[in-house]
Image (cartoon, rainbow, N blue to C red):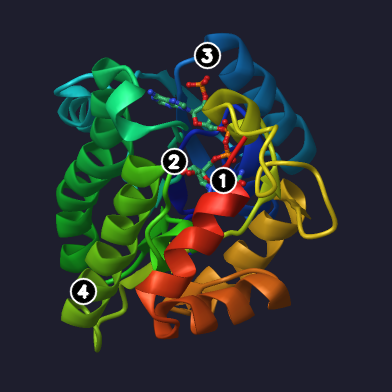
């Protein structure tokens, strides 16, 4: 069978880079997307050398309006068939919502929600026509409850979880896999970019998983067709418990964990 291609956003570092390594190791060719050309080149060289993958790099800022469309047109023009779409690129902001730069919040929503939705819409058609492939959207354990001091981020991930589960159900019975990955705290650049290294949740600790482990679990379970993928026992337990605890109890706990 011909090799399949996975398009991975946010593949220049962190979880996306590790997911790219998993897909390359699994025999996929790759389209790697992020803003940093250097980061993408570095990742592409490794995938080519170690796993003989054909790699196309596509530097795009997916927080810009219209970027998802442009990326889709770019892959069409370059004759790239995307069998698997991994919507991984995302970031968080921290602080009192009313004090966060509104442009940062808009970028967050554009990237975490709009680009993810738009890319899913654009690439899913072909997958359904071919009746194979799939979408892996990256949410977070933040999806399971609201998050004071990271309000827009938690809400964006709740959207990703809800959206992905619904689309997955629409396509049940087909051979197109639609999954959502919900990692807990993972050691990447995420904490520094979100400005949460000084919080209980953002600090390096026993509960923080490596991006490599998160990606390994995610790849294996995505390939098995699992719909909601939560790496790590503590994260799984939290995801089960949090939605069942009254909000009046859970909100002050998250607020304390997120406080600097
Ligand atoms: N780390 C955690 O604790 C954690 C926990 C749960 C969920 N997640 C989720 O996991 C995903 C990956 O995060 P990570 O932890 O790997 O963070 P990371 O190390 O900061 O990596 C983020 C990736 O996204 C890319 N990116 C950021 N802004 C972009 C933009 N505007 N356009 C295109 N690409 C962009 C970055 O590359 P460039 O800077 O080169 O663009 C980088 O490749 C995110 O959706 C995050 O919300 C993370």
Dot 2 or dot 3, earlier in sequence: 3
Q: Is residue 182 visible?
A: no
Cα separation, mark 4 vs mark 3, equals: 32 Å
Task: Please say if 43 is above or below 85.
Answer: above
| Residue tagged 3 | 36
Instruction: Answer with left or right where residue 222 lies relative to residue 217.
Output: left
- Asked if ligand 1 lies within 8 A of label 3, the reply is yes
- Quarter of the figure with residue 191: top right
Dot 4 or dot 2, earlier in sequence: 2
Mark identifier at residue 258: 1
Q: Nearer the viewer, mark 4 or mark 2?
A: 2
Secondary structure type for disc 3: loop
Dot 4 or dot 3, earlier in sequence: 3
Cα separation, mark 1 vs mark 3, equals: 29 Å
Q: Position of residue 117 (x, y in %)?
A: 21, 48
- Quarter of the figure with residue 130: bottom left
| Residue tagged 4 | 166
Going 76% across and 31% down the picture, which residue do you hit? 49
């Amino acid at each position: 069978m011909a090799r399949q291609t996975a398009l991975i956003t946010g593949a220049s570092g962190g979880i996306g880079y590790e997911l790219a390594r998993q897909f390359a190791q699994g025999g996929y060719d790759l389209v790697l997307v992020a803003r940093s050309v250097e980061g993408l080149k570095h990742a592409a060289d490794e995938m080519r050398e170690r796993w003989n993958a054909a790699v196309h790099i596509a530097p795009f800022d997916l927080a810009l309006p219209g970027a998802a469309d442009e990326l889709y047109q770019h892959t069409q023009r370059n004759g790239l068939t995307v069998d698997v779409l991994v919507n991984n690129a995302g970031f968080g902001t921290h602080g009192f919502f009313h004090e966060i730069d509104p442009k940062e919040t808009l970028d967050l929503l554009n990237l975490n929600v709009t680009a993810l939705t738009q890319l899913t819409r654009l690439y899913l058609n072909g997958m359904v026509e071919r009746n194979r492939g799939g979408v892996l959207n990256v949410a977070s354990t933040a999806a399971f409850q609201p998050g004071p001091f990271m309000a827009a981020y938690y809400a964006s991930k709740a959207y990703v979880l809800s959206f992905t589960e619904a689309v997955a159900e629409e396509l049940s019975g087909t051979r197109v896999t639609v999954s959502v990955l919900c990692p807990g705290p993972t050691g990447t650049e995420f904490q520094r970019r979100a400005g949460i290294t000084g919080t209980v949740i953002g600090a390096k600790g026993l509960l923080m998983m490596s991006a490599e482990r998160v990606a390994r679990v995610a790849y294996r379970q995505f390939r098995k067709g699992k719909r909601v993928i939560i790496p790590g026992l503590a994260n799984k337990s939290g995801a089960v418990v949090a939605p069942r605890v009254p909000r009046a109890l859970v909100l002050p706990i998250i607020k304390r964990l997120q406080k600097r």
